[in-house]
Image (cartoon, rainbow, N blue to C red):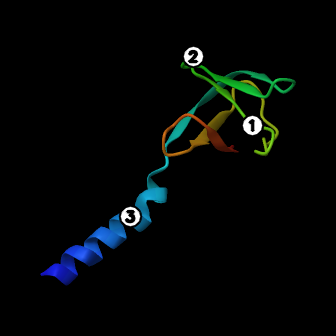
Amino acid sequence: MKKIILAASAITLMSGAAFASSAEGVVAKFDPAVRVITLESGHSYSVPRDVAIPSIQTGEKVSIQLNDEGDKVQGVLR
């Protein structure tokens, strides 16, 4: 029984990165000078300089990949 519990605990710990959050929506505004993406929902995301931003335009659907805490952008996908 202990082995099953230990195995389940290990799997849970290792899969934690798979639960990173994301936000999807349509781009309402994008300011490349300050690297801020604003979605039609009103949420704005500041993209760090070390994260690549694909060529996006107003009206396109994007997915903003966030860290586990949901407070730092880790990726932007079209």
Instruction: Give the mark nearer the N terminus: 1 vs 2.
Output: 2
Residue 75 location (% of width, % of height): 67, 46
**Residue found at x 25% / y 76%:** 6
Q: Is residue 14 left or right of residue 40?
A: left
The residue carrying mark 3 is 13
Q: Is residue 13 above or below residue 60?
A: below
- Circles 1 and 2, Cβ within 8 Å, touching? The answer is no
Nearer the camera: disc 3 or disc 2: 3
Tell me the SS state at disc 1: loop
How many numbered tags mark residues here?
Answer: 3
Residue 30 location (% of width, % of height): 76, 23
Tell me the SS state at disc 3: helix
Nearer the camera: disc 1 or disc 2: 1
Q: Amino acid at mark 2?
A: Gly
The residue carrying mark 1 is 48
The quadrant in which residue 33 appears is top right
Q: Amino acid at mark 1?
A: Pro
Q: Amino acid at mark 3?
A: Leu
Real-space Cα separation, disc 1 to disc 3, in angstroms? 27 Å
The residue carrying mark 2 is 42
